[in-house]
């Protein structure tokens, strides 16, 4: 019964992180801050929820195939979410969307001068 409590806590933590990401998207001032909130928090929320799902599938349901599928989905999200956010941020910068505050280091601007 203790493992069920751990699973429920992990899924609840994942849901809280997903809610925090949603609130961050609504409250942050500019595009880059919103992407930071949505990407990092959603990835961590997905990780917690996926760990809970893997434990539930493996221990409670006794389904190794379901646990492996959940783990593969979690791995793909963890690998692709930061890459997608970086591509979107670079595209936004290229299209002239700048942060509200002045940047002290402008790596995207430095990279774009070479193109």
Image (cartoon, rainbow, N blue to C red):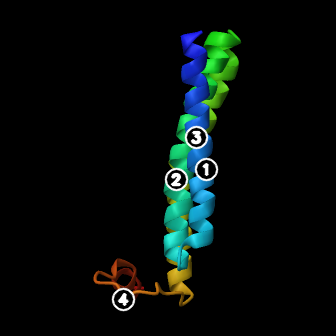
Distance of label 2 from label 1 (alpha carbons): 7 Å
**Label 1, residues with CA under 10 Å away: few <14, some 14-19, many ≥20:** many
Q: Dot 4, how many residues are within 10 Å of its Cα: few (below 14), some (14-19), or many (20+)?
A: few
Is there CB contact under 8 Å for labels 2 and 4? Answer: no
Q: Are marks 1 and 3 in contact (CB under 8 Å)?
A: yes
Residue 80 appears in the figure: no
Q: Which residue is mark 1?
A: 18
Q: Which residue is the site of mark 3?
A: 14
Q: Would you name the residue on which mark 2 appears? A: 41
Q: Earlier in the sequence, mark 3 or mark 2?
A: 3
Q: CA distance from mark 2 to mark 4?
A: 24 Å
Marked residue nearer the N-terminal end (2 or 4) = 2
Element class at badge 1? helix
N-term-proximal mark, 2 vs 1 = 1
User: 65 left or right of 84?
Assistant: right
Against 77, residue 33 (above or below) is below
10 or 108: nearer the viewer? 10
Q: Earlier in the sequence, mark 4 or mark 3?
A: 3
Q: Residue at x 54, y 12 (%)?
A: 2
Callouts 1 and 4 close, C-beta under 8 Å: no
N-term mark: 1 or 4: 1
Task: State which quadrant residue 21 falls in.
Answer: bottom right
Residue placed at 61% from the left, 62% from the top? 23
Q: Position of residue 12 (x, y in %)?
A: 60, 36
In the rendered image, the residue lying farthest to the left is 104
Give the quadrant of the N terminus. top right
Pointer 2: residues within 10 angstroms few (<14), some, or many (20+)?
many
Q: Nearer the viewer, residue 55 or 19?
A: 19
Q: Which mark is residue 102?
A: 4
């Amino acid at each position: 019964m203790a493992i069920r409590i751990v699973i429920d806590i992990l899924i609840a933590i994942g849901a809280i992180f997903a809610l925090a990401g949603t609130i961050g998207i609504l409250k942050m001032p500019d595009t880059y801050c919103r992407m930071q909130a949505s990407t990092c928090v959603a990835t961590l929320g997905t990780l917690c929820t996926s760990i809970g799902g893997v434990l539930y599938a493996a221990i409670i349901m006794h389904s190794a195939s379901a646990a492996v599928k959940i783990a593969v989905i979690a791995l793909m999200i963890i690998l692709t979410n930061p890459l997608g956010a970086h591509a979107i941020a670079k595209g936004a910068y290229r299209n002239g969307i700048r942060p509200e505050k002045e940047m002290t280091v402008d790596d995207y601007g430095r990279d774009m001068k070479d193109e």
